[in-house]
Image: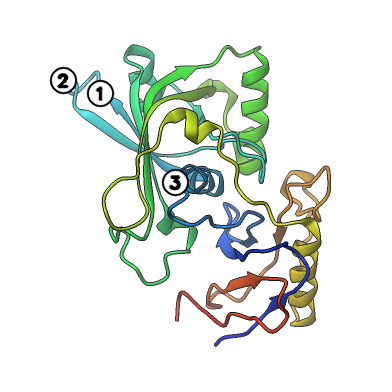
Amino acid sequence: MKFEFVCSSVLASFLVLGFFQESVHGRPLLMSQARPRPDNAAAFARWLVSQSSWGVLNTISSDWGGAPFGNVVSFSDGLPGKGKGIPYFYLTALDPTASNALKDQRSSFTISEYNLGTCGKKDPENPTCAKITLVGKLKLLEGTSKEAEFAQTALFTKHPEMKDWPKSHNFQVFKLEIENIFMINWFGGPKPLTVEQYLHATIQTLPASAIHRIAEKLRSLGYVEESSNDTADEALPPGPNSPGEIFIPFPTRLPKYRVGHTLDPSWSTPENPDS
């Protein structure tokens, strides 16, 4: 099953791509940020981090003689579409990851593009299916600090169920203070990328008008945005107070489609990475 789709008035002179991705709620998510070219290492790294919702956080185990301990954790680097590049985590010392970090802050955090559904049928280890490891120190944030408040908002926005996790478990906000970056997103080995380049990179965000036009096309095909009585879980239309994303329920087996945007109305892409 394939379809062609054109949105013809959204960008000035170049092509960007949007994707359907599974959100943390299990609903397809129309991503509001374009996948950068692989040769734009800093922007690509920021895109990969901002679009992801989980990864493997590695710490030095205090119980196993200093062996590395990897743990699957959820994270956020900011509000949807407005990521800052710094991963924040909501952890409890009842779990080894936080307990380890409180004794030895050295850590690394690994994310794979495969989780986004944008690698098609490529194997996760294929160099063109990007992967990034951020190396640094995992630090506990002061609970009353502005950064902790920002991080908690970012985490609860991306992972709404976190706010209902047991208070008795004493979850706290941690951040990864990045010192080194390892990323492969194409052939030829890891991309040279400094922390400064990474933090100052910008990624293309699709205009609200483009998101709306895509949504209208999907509505015409019979798909309707989900509604919810839970405001924290409700998909808002793009706007100054919204995440700039639209959630739309799809049949379980509907393939993920790649949607092209260009000024040229004669251009379209039937490309389906899952076909």
State the image coordinates of residue 162 (x, y, percent, origin top left): 60, 36
Please state, as top left, top right, bottom left or bottom right, where the C terminus lies in the image: bottom left
Give the crowd class for mark 1: few <14, some 14-19, many >=20 residues within 10 Å: some
Quick one: SS at disc 2?
A: loop
State the image coordinates of residue 212 (x, y, percent, origin top left): 80, 64
Q: Which residue is pictured at 53% across the width and 77% down the height?
A: 255
- Pointer 3: what residue? 41
Q: 183 or 122: nearer the eye?
A: 183
Residue that protrudes farthest toward the right in the picture: 240
Image quadrant in which you'd find residue 84 = top right
Q: Which residue is pictured at 19% across the width and 27% down the height?
A: 67
- Given contact means CB atoms under 8 Å apart, are the residues at marks 1 and 3 in contact? no
Q: Which residue is pictured at 52% across the width and 42% down the height?
A: 46
State the image coordinates of residue 233 (x, y, percent, origin top left): 72, 49
- Pointer 2: what residue? 65
| 163 with respect to 105 (left or right) | right
Quick one: SS at disc 3?
A: helix
Residue that protrudes farthest toward the bottom in the picture: 1
Quick one: SS at disc 1?
A: loop
Residue that protrudes farthest toward the front in the picture: 13
Q: Which residue is pictured at 61% across the width and 66% down the height?
A: 15
- Given contact means CB atoms under 8 Å apart, are the residues at marks 1 and 2 in contact? yes
**Structural distance between the alpha carbons of marks 1 and 2:** 7 Å
Colouring: rainbow
Is residue 226 visible in the rendered image? The answer is no
